[in-house]
Structures are given as C-alpha cells and as structure tokens.
Image: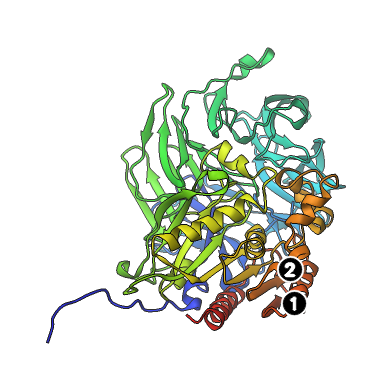
Amino acid sequence: MSNASGPKPAIPLAADVALGRSPVLRDPQLVGDWVLWLEQRPQEKGRTTALIRPWKAEDQQPQELTPAPCDLRSRVHDYGGGTLASHAEGDLLLLVWVDDTDGCLWSQSWQGLRQNRNPLNSLKPIAPPRRLTQPGSPLADGIIDHHRRRWLGVMEAEGRDWLVCVDLERADQTPAVLHQPQDFAGYMALSADGDRLAWVEWTQPAMPWDCSTLWCSCINREGMPQHPFQLAGDTTESGDRVSVFQPQWLNDGRLLVAEDRSGWWNLIHCRPEAWSSAPHWQRPWPMQAETAMPQWIYGMSTTAWDGEQVVAAICDQGRWKLNCLTNDGTIQAIEQPFDDLAGLRAANGRAVAIASNGNTGMGLLELDLTNGEWRHTPASPAVLPPEQISRAEAIWFNGANGERTHAWYYPPTGAHPGPAPLLVKGHSGPTAMARTGLNLAIQFWTSRGWGVVDVNYGGSTGFGRAYRDRLQQGWGVVDVEDCAAAAQALVTNGRAHPDQIAMEGGSAGGFTTLACLCFTDVFRAGACRYAVSDLTAMATDTHRFEARYLDGLVGDWPAERERYEARSPLHHADKIRCPVIFFQGLKDKVVPAEQTERMASALQANGIPVEVITFPEEGHGFRDSAVQVAVLEATEAFFRRHLDV
C-alpha cells in the first residue's frame, strides 16, 4: 500500500457560495474616530445602505444608518456614483444621500461621535430623515459645503449636466443652479475655507479619460462661482488629449490633480497665488505607473491627504499598491499585502480603502500611517481554504499588431494533468482592467477543472496612456485579436485544450465575446451578459453618457458607417458556428433588450444552438444575488453540455 500523496481533486465551489453571499463595499469615509462606508447587498436585490463603526473596531457589529427601504443609488449618466456625502462636527454627524426609492436627496443627523467605545456604542438619530428635494432630475456626486449649510452636486437635466446646490435647512425644494457646463461635469472639490471650488468638465465626443479639463472659481458672498476659468487639461478642439482625475484641495492650500500629459496618470499640484498668470504646476512624483482610473462613476478616489502628506494608490503593471508622497518628492511604500485597491480616503494620519488580494476577498482596510499598522475586515467570511484557491499568474504574449499584451491566468485547482478547458474573460468598459482581488466567480470555474484567463487587452487601464489608446478606432479588432492570442498562447504551452475554449463577458466584454466568436476560429462556445451586438444601433440608441463613445473606439458616426457594420456581430451572425447563451435585463437602458433579441434570432435562423434568459427587474449589470447565481449556474451547464467537460 502506497503512502504517496499527490494533488487532491478540488471541491467544486457552489454558485450560491461564489456569488450569493458577499456584499460589495464602496466609498469608505473617515468621520472623526469612525469609519463610514456603503454596502451593496445582493441578497436584498442589490439595495445599498450606509454602515458605520468606530475605527479599527472590527469586532463590533457596524450600525446601519439607512435601513430599508432606503437604497443609496444615483441614476445620473445611468452609472451614478457619489451617492453619499458626510460631515462631522464635534459630536454630530450629518449624512446627505441620493435615495433610489424616489430619486430625491435626503438628509439625517446623528449624535454620539465622541462617545467612549463599548460593545453597545451607537449613534443616536436627532430627528427622522428629511427629504430635501422634490422628485425630478437625477442627482449625484455630492459634497457638503458646511460653511453655507448646503449640498453641492451634479444634476442631469435638459441633455446636459448642471452644478447645483441644495439648502440643508429646507424640505422639498428644487436644486439651485451654480454653473452651466458646456456638456458634462462633476468631481467637485471645495477648499477647506469654502472660498474656492474646483471641478472637471468634458464634452462629447470625448469621454473623461480621453480628454477633460480642470476648472476653478472663487465663491462670492452670494455663494456663487465667480468667473470660472480653466486651470489644466485639454479639450478636443485643442488637438491635445489630456485627461484629469480627482481634483482635491490640500490643507496647505495647494490644488492636487492627476493628469496624463506624460503618458501616465501622475499627480501635479499648484498654489492659488500662481493663478493670476499661467498656473505653475509642479510634478514632484513622476513615474511610469497610474494614479487614476477611468471615471465611469462619480465618487472614485485613488489619492488622499492625511493632514501632512499625500497618500496614493498606484497601479503598476496591473497591480495596485499604496505609497506616501512627501513634499520633497520622495515616494515611500506603505507595507501592506493588498494589491487590488479602491476608494482611498485619509485624514489625521489614518487611511481607509476597499482592498483585496488573490487570497482574501474584498474588505475594509484601515491603516495607521504613523506606525504602519493595518487591519483588514473582509466583507464576508472566507469560503475557500488557501490550498483550494487558484492564484493569478501574470502572462505576456504578442497580441494585436505584435504588441506585448498582458493577462492574468488562473490554473485549475487540484489534480488536472494535461491541457484543461479554458474560459477567456473579457472585461467591461472596455477601458476597465482585469483585477487581482479574489474573485469567487473565477474560483467557481477553476474548482471545476477549468483554467481561466482574464485578459488586459489593448485599451485596458493600468498600463499607461499608449496601452489605453491602442483601442482608439480599434474596438472589435484589437480586443478580439488580443483575447484570441491569449487563448492560443495557453494552447501552445500545453495548458489549454484547443477544443474546449469558451469565452464570456458582459456589456463591452459581451461585444468582445461575440466578435471573438464571429471573427476568429479559436472559441467553441460563448456566454454574453447584456452584450453590445450592433454598433450601429448603439451609435444611435444609447444613453447620453455613451452617445458619442464609439466615435473614438470605432470612428466618426455616421461617416464611418461601413466600419460599424463590418465590426458588428449582428451583421455577420452567419460567421458564428458555436453555441451561445445570452442573459439580458429588460430594464437595460445602455444596451436595450432588443439588441439581444435580434442577435439571438439571427443565430437561431442559422441553426446555431442558442439560449436566451431574461430578467424583468434587472438593468445594465445584475444586482440581485438570485440573478447572479442563476447566470453562473446556467453558463456552466451550457458549457458542460456543449463542450463535453
């Protein structure tokens, strides 16, 4: 009898464990000695609520400040973000939020911020929530101007964005206009003294990560911006393409912003006394790494001021890290084990972020910047032992036009000799990135003997402007060739079985999936969630935020109509020879259900095995845990049935 031991077969991870239990954490904030954050709960159909607890008291149950039916969500640009603003003063906490139940702005105050910490410690509401605005145009991206007792934010109305204010002392009011941008605007930052306001603007056809401008204004006695002027960035008319990200005021009076004129989103700053002439921007921390990300939603934060220094989340070769940036230009690493970071905030020598890595799921990271101590509180308990986790391996390969291209490969867990089935993932955006945090949906596949490759195809964020610009005029070509090349590289080195390669993606990733099935012979099955299938339809029938997005990704519409049709899978459905399963929300305003219906019908007419599963209450992106689980289980069953795995 042999005592030899080898790799043990992996225990398949159930879909309801992978997707049905973990809340999504967002937008952490520091308020005195407390930490405040948002929690999106898939088991409550994606409802988002605000939670709070004392700093580093992870053993204390957080207090929910906005219980049901409150749902903190914004509909501005359909992607929303920036739903919660807070202000702490002495013993009092003020929250102002956008509530999806009626689309209105609400506020409530609590007392107890200075109480001694104990297991029963909680904040006490001073009064019931108050509705500040009447139902009407959607609002988002709020900050509190405590000097004037008002909320500042963005209102989308009449085909444009408006910078508006709302009096915190009145109920059921109409927001007052502060500024009329030419097109899009947001990401407002108010100086500590309340005298200066900075914000970002951009105009179609540019997206904010293509080119945008930083604006600034003094605030007059009536509380209005006075003589706004452009301070940084470039417009499409200038011929330059510079993007700015997350302006913020430092306590010493400097204005800090990330911009990518160097080819990388790096931080620059200047002082207000320089504004009387051409502003003198300083670039003290140049690096070939990114300190920003595409501004799809409001409220994104990758840098913060802790009172003495800048704290920055920096993406280098697809991994995030934390650094302190000192006034003398020194970049000091903050030692902590997480390489997937978002929502960074800091104050008084402390920092907080949403963090994960390949072994640990999303959680709240709290750092004491004075002594380097950190603490991480996962959003949910671990469901996999370390030995059952497939860890990402960085791979580089020659993609479209021979360019070196990056992906994360997750090998199957357990004993799987020889080439394995391969799932290729195409991320959304398409400017997003394949991230490194523990993804239980990926572990669902690797625990079943699949390898998974998550491709940072040309156009992805985290590798500099030139890498991101590879997709300019190239969507449907560059991303397709890169995903096919990633799969072929794994076949060549013996890790993937050439007859068992599937691809899946949602939104833009769904388009890339369909295009890969259509224009390459690498893939044997596909799964698409709310996928773009007809570029011509998207160019004429989508929401305002992305109405001109394809001008950059594909070409000027309608002058380049032939290019749109040449790259649209719907116009070439006869080239798809493998089974496809579709998932579609019937409330989707970004990719209307009609696109999916037409694509599925075209494939069925050609005799291709097709399944279509619709969800009446879902929009663009599935929020309900029951829906997420159903999608994963149906995808796996579909692939197993058609790929014989």
Say left or right for 531 vs 285: right
Instruction: Give the image location of residue 645, x and y in percent.
Output: 47, 80
Mark 2–mark 1 CB contact (< 8 Å): yes
Instruction: Give the image location of residue 523, x and y in percent.
Output: 57, 67
Residue at the location (64% across, 34% down)?
Answer: 243
Q: Which residue is mark 1?
A: 606
**Does the rendering let one see residue 221?**
no
Q: Which one is nearer the viewer's eye here, 23 or 251?
A: 23
The N terminus lies in quadrant: bottom left
Sequence-first tag of 2 and 1: 2
Residue type beneath disc 2: Ala
Instruction: Give the image location of residue 167, x and y in percent.
Output: 75, 44
Q: Which residue is mark 2?
A: 573
Q: Secondary structure at mark 2?
A: helix
Say left or right for 40 vs 609: left
Residue type beneath disc 1: Asn
Q: Which one is nearer the viewer's eye here, 305 or 389?
A: 389
Q: In the displayed structure, would residue 317 be above or below residue 199?
A: below
